[in-house]
Amino acid sequence: MAQIRISIVTETYVPDVNGVANSLRQLLSALNPEQFRIQIIRTCPRSGWLPESEEVWCRGLTIPMYPDLQLGLPARRRVARAWKSFQPDLVYIATEGPLGNSALRQARRQGIPVISAFHTNFHRYSSYYGLGWIKSLTLAWLRRFHNRTAATLVPAGEIAAALSADGFRNVSVLPHGVDCQLFHPRRRSIALRQQWQVGSEPVLLYVGRIAAEKNIPLAIHSWQALRAQGTDARLVMVGDGPMRAELEREYPQIVFAGVQTGEALARYFASADAFIFPSQTETFGLVTLEAMASGLPVVAFNMAAAQMHVQAGINGELATTDSDDAFIAATLRLAGSNLQAMGVAARSQAERASWQSVAEQFSTLAISHVSTESRNKTGQIQTMV
């Protein structure tokens, strides 16, 4: 069987540090190279990067409040030139920005089947920046974009149900996986804990953007509630963002570690004792699975990855409602549990979520859409004859 040529269009990819870039790389790495040939059309990387497959780089602009991300500029002609030589059988648009929109328009013009991904709740972000009035406009634009593709892939059933209720058509669930070799309890580092100035006391870890939409103040309030009960816990926050500088000044007792990647990030995960994740804007929250693979029980709201993988009282705790009080109560329950035993259970759960399994699901979906388009074209030719 001839290789299926898939052109991936995305505004973010490694070496960018975010869940979309990391998940996309893991998915592509797990695809069978004998079955698929990959082309990546992306914004130009801003740090050293040696492409692992064919890449076409396009111009991008820094996103306000997100200096580590870019918004791809419209590039229909560049996309058309790239496809003239590559001749894709399928286009997979991983982000919905201007670059993705250019690709969608060109693919429709050329009759190439398109599937898309919904990774980020942009319409939910607006309320965290005092822009709640644009929520409906953003949702309408996203709906129009995705409804012009053959399928929209989301990482969790909860997101699929919400989008379907909002008028999105042909929504399918493609869960994320986790690299259980990189994220592993064996990477626990006594030296790193000494750097944090802790011994046997528990360490709560947060990994992600230090930004309003991640609900960072709730993580801090939960840690403070724990300390108020007499538990000398330490809070370590990995990541960067617009809130970091102010919070560092206000809370010198918190360890702000900045951005960590690769094995360094894996050591941070494994060297903590519990993972605290108060975000309510996630479509999945890959860091939840990375924490569990590292042997950490998780405190989170009952949504996205936590809803799929966290079992309250077994490998973590879930907030019973969407309130801050419920999240703080979940943190306190976790702190009073056997963290080591829950961490073992968390690792066991993460081991069931492999990227190979995800890649097999994606392969089946991709082949079905290519086959459907081939049948449609055959029917069109027969009708014309």
Image (cartoon, rainbow, N blue to C red):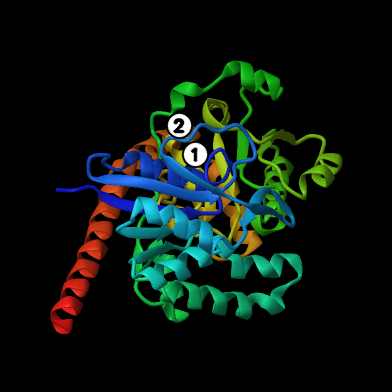
Q: Position of residue 73 (x, y in %)?
A: 62, 59
- The answer to whether one can see residue 111 in this image is yes
Position of 240 compared to 334: left or right?
A: right
Front: mark 1 or 2 = 2
Q: Cα distance, mark 1 to mark 2?
A: 8 Å
Which corner quadrant of the image does residue 218 belong to? bottom right
Q: Position of residue 348 (x, y in %)?
A: 34, 37
* Residue position for label 2: 183
Rendered image: mark on residue 270: none
Q: Residues within 10 Å of mark 2 (few under 14, many from 20)?
A: many
Numbered circles on residues, count: 2
Q: Residues within 10 Å of mark 1 (few under 14, many from 20)?
A: many
The type of residue carrying mark 1 is Ala
Q: Secondary structure at mark 1?
A: helix
Q: Residue furthest right?
A: 249
Q: Position of residue 173 (x, y in %)?
A: 35, 62
Q: Position of residue 160 (x, y in %)?
A: 40, 69
Position of 137 compared to 304: left or right?
A: right
* Residue position for label 1: 291
Q: Residue furthest top?
A: 191
Q: Secondary structure at mark 2?
A: loop
**Cβ atoms under marks 1 and 2 closer than 8 Å:** yes
The type of residue carrying mark 2 is Phe
The image shows residue 149, relative to residue 61, as above or below, that is below
Q: Quadrant of the C terminus?
A: bottom left
> At 47% from the left edge and 39% from the top edge, which residue is drawn?
290
Dot 1 or dot 2, earlier in sequence:
2
The image shows residue 365, relative to residue 349, as above or below, that is below
- The answer to whether one can see residue 177 in this image is no
Q: Nearer the viewer, residue 243 or 69?
A: 69
> At 52% from the left edge and 67% from the top edge, which residue is drawn?
101
> At 75% from the left edge and 36% from the top edge, which residue is drawn?
254
